[in-house]
Image (cartoon, rainbow, N blue to C red):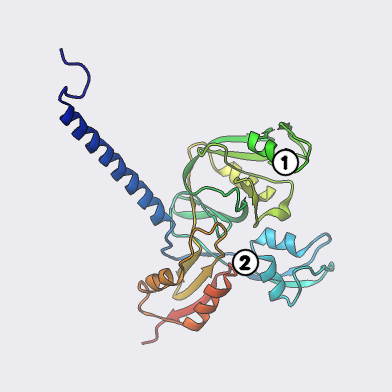
Amino acid sequence: MKRGWFPNDSSLRITLVFLIASLLCFFSSVSQSRAADLNRATIADQLVGGEFPYVVRSGDSLTGISARFGVGVNVLAGDNDLSPRSLLKMGQHLRVDSRHIVPNVVSDGIVINIPQRMLFYFKERRLIRAFPVGLGRYDWPTPTGAFQIVAKKENPIWSVPISIQEEMQREGKSVQTCVPPGPDNPLGKHWLGLSIPGYGIHGTIAPASIYHFQTHGCIRAHPDDIAGLFDEVSPGTRGLLVYQRLLIANVGGRVFLEVHPDAYKKDPELRARFEELLKSLPQFSIDRELATGIIRNQDGIARQIGVGSLR
């Protein structure tokens, strides 16, 4: 009696194994191609943030202000003729430019663009929230890919992963295995667990660390921002982590370009992508010299490079 799914003939078995392996490779390559497509910027149509004056308050620093509004410290300092190490005075007037392009990736759910260090939340094709986040260090990068919210916890307990315990030991720190809720818990007051094991979106007790690559891979948000998102999402909410360094938007006939440094050394080629995207805007007059400067400086701010052609 024949047993099992495979025929007894060995040559047929080999052929079937080869066909199954080929199909698995095909579907894997399709999945990888789709992920790569998500990381390839398309023409967007929305900006967030803006240009506005800011009056320095007690305790403010350039690092803290840049973290709150999603602006690089060097950019904020340069826009105000200051050194990045300048001390601020209460009542001092600053100019802040926090314009960012909203990635054209999904119309529902969460998008986190890693180089941009921004989180966007959409619901029924409307952008509900956008705010800066802190992400993983170069040696502990935040992964890309699709995810779902699988857990919501207020005042979470931090069970310290073994890998972080080992890091504490290497650095000569007191090794912690569990941190209870409270002012010393680095997760803050809100935790949104992701379907990517070990990762989450959470608050922080160090708001000035936002808009930096300083975490062990998780997504760190200002306490006010994560509190709002926490109330609006539920288990099952879908999201994407993408890696788009270069973004272009057509906003009401004005073309904007935003470029970020390659934090994880994953995307060295920008110029070709820029030229490819411009093919979608043949009717626009583009200041290529200005665009070249933006690509070179990579300051992470959306800046206008063109307008609708008058011809």
Question: Which element type, helix, strand or loop, lies under badge 2?
Answer: loop
Residue at 35 percent of width and 78 percent of height: 282
Residue closest to the eye, 147 or 267: 267
The residue singled out by tag 2 in the image is: 98
Residue 170's label in the rendered image is 1
The residue type indicated by label 2 comes to: Ser
Question: Which label's residue is closer to the chain start, 2 or 1?
Answer: 2
Question: Which element type, helix, strand or loop, lies under badge 1?
Answer: helix
- Above or below — where is 287 with respect to 91? below
The location of residue 248, given as percent across then percent down, is 46, 69
Residue closest to the eye, 2 or 289: 2
Answer with left or right where residue 311 lies relative to residue 210: left
Q: Is residue 85 visible?
A: yes
Report the label total.
2
Instruction: Work out which quarter of the rendered image holds the C terminus and state it.
Output: bottom left
Residue closest to the eye, 16 or 99: 16
Answer with left or right where residue 285 lies relative to residue 133: left
Mark 2: few, some, or many residues within 10 Å (few <14, many ≥20)? many
Instruction: Work out which quarter of the rendered image holds the N terminus and state it.
Output: top left
The residue type indicated by label 1 comes to: Arg
Residue at 66 percent of width and 65 percent of height: 72
Residue at 36 percent of width and 46 percent of height: 31
